[in-house]
Image (spheres, grey):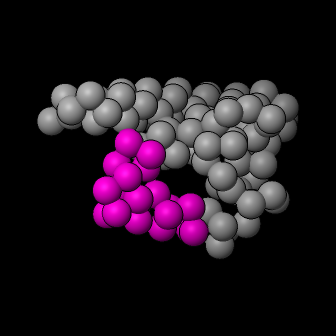
Amino acid sequence: MSEYYQLGRSHSAPHAIASIADPPTAEEMTRLADRVLSGMHDGDVDVAFDRAAAFCRVIARGQALWADQRGVSSGDAQRLTSRANQLVRTAEELELSARSYRVSTLD
């Protein structure tokens, strides 16, 4: 996972919002999950949704780039691309949840 994150990060907003140490380690990935879940508990629900969405977008980009640049088999590339697409959809749902929370329409 941290390899996908390293490959998918850029000087983009999602990387900055996810706020992972550079370079990310497995421990840092665990700390991010803890921070996101802690934000949900502390009442920063919208921020937690946004950070989780940003993380998903960076990982998705890393998976897509890995499939394209690392010389993986076509089957592996197809699986990685499919997972990346699923993560983008998850990110979109999380972003919608954050927006809905901000306007008090989150169910």
Residue at x-position 26% and y-position 28%: 103
Quadrant of the image containing the C terminus: top left
Which one is nearer the viewer's eye here, 33 or 106?
A: 106
Q: Is residue 65 left or right of residue 46?
A: right
Q: Is residue 25 left or right of residue 85?
A: right
The answer to whether one can see residue 81 in this image is yes
Which one is nearer the viewer's eye here, 80 or 99?
A: 99
Which of the 4 image quarters holds residue 15?
top right
The extreme bottom residue here reads 27
Q: Position of residue 12 (x, y in %)?
A: 74, 32
Q: Is residue 18 above or below residue 61?
A: below
Query: Is residue 46 shown in magenta?
Result: yes
The chief SS type of the magenta part is helix
Query: Is residue 45 shown in magenta?
Result: yes
Q: Position of residue 61 (x, y in %)?
A: 68, 32
Residue at x-position 61% and y-position 63%: 29
User: What is the magenta range?
Assistant: 30-48
Quadrant of the image containing the N terminus: bottom right
The answer to whether one can see residue 66 in this image is no
Q: Position of residue 14 (x, y in %)?
A: 64, 36
Q: Position of residue 62 (x, y in %)?
A: 71, 38
Which one is nearer the viewer's eye here, 64 or 43?
A: 43
Which of the 4 image quarters holds residue 105?
top left
Which one is nearer the viewer's eye here, 44 or 84?
A: 44
Residue at x-position 81% and y-position 59%: 23
